[in-house]
Image (spheres, rainbow, N blue to C red):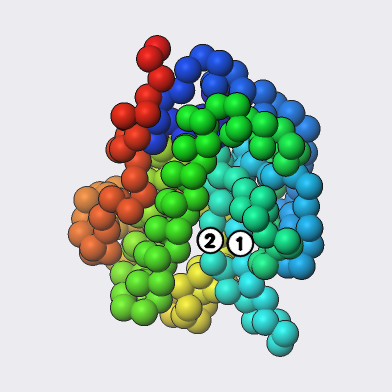
Amino acid sequence: MTSPLILRLQQYVRFSQDELSTLQSMTNSNMRRLRARHDLLREGERSTHVHLVLEGWAYRHKMLEDGRRQIIAFLLPGDLCNSNLFMLRQMDHSVGALSPLRYASVPHVVLERAVQDRPRISHALNWDMLVASAIQREWTVSLGQRSAIERIAHLLCELFVRLDAVSQVRDNSYEIPLTQNDLAETAGITPVHVNRTLQQLRAQGLIQWKGRELHVPDFESLKQLAMFDAGYLHLDHEGAFLDANV
């Protein structure tokens, strides 16, 4: 099975067979599991490994002293949880599992060797970090300018596109392990407001959410409501000029 990391990075650039083998071996090394609702990394910790999500969802979050929490990112299959630890002395936020998580724990030295010996992998990982920053900017716009229904709709569109890029969408449906409280802590509204907003989206025929599965009957209409433009995700092979000659 192709690594979700490869599926993700190949949205930017095409790799040689040697580079694909390197990325696949990173995925297959030191695989671990974590139960849902447990932290993988905590604020203030140091780590000698970079963690790659293979199955399930993780999330970045910040906790205030009084227990209030803000979710600041979702980490999906193919995402690296802490690739920036090459530069950071310690974690400045926490990373937890939203669902049962299977991940690869890659030693820093292994990743460092891969990016030093294979510049195309380095370019792709840098591209991925730039996209993570672009996602953060879009979330800031949502918190500052979009209405509640636009925030939720925009988030659901983003998750649809990101999951589709790693073959996690089937028949316009994807698994979503989020509670209404998770959505509240992401969108900056109350759980009651989240419930009312989801009811609005259902009433308009834009989503069907049963259990842990979200179905989007009319993605174009959901995009229109959210004013969603996937350009900030840069998933249209913008790094073609870096492609390997294969």
Report helix, strand or loop for mark 1: strand
Q: How far across and down, in percent of the image, does residue 224 sit?
A: 20, 59
The residue lying furthest to the bottom in this view is 66
Most foreground residue, 101 or 64: 64
| Disc 1 packing (10 Å; few <14; some 14–19; many ≥20) | many
Residue that badge 1 annotates? 60
Task: Indicate the quadrant where residue 11 lies.
Answer: top left
* Residue 62 visible: yes
* Three-letter code, disc 1: Arg
Residue at 31%, 29% in the rendered image: 241
- The amino acid type found where label 2 is placed reads Ala
Looking at the rendered structure, which numbered label has been put on residue 139?
none
Q: Which residue is mark 2?
A: 73
> Is 18 situated left or right of 51 in this image?
left
- The reply to whether callout 2 and callout 1 are in contact (CB within 8 Å) is yes
Residue in the picture at 36% in, 79% down: 144
The span from disc 2 to disc 1 (Cα, nearest Å) is: 5 Å
Q: Quadrant of residue 38?
A: bottom right
Q: Is residue 206 left or right of residue 116?
A: left
- Closer to the camera in the image, 35 or 39: 39
Q: Is residue 102 visible?
A: no
Q: Is residue 26 above or below residue 93?
A: above
Query: Can you give x and y, in whole percent of width and height, for residue 89 in the image?
Result: 73, 61
Q: Residue at x 53, y 36 (%)?
A: 122
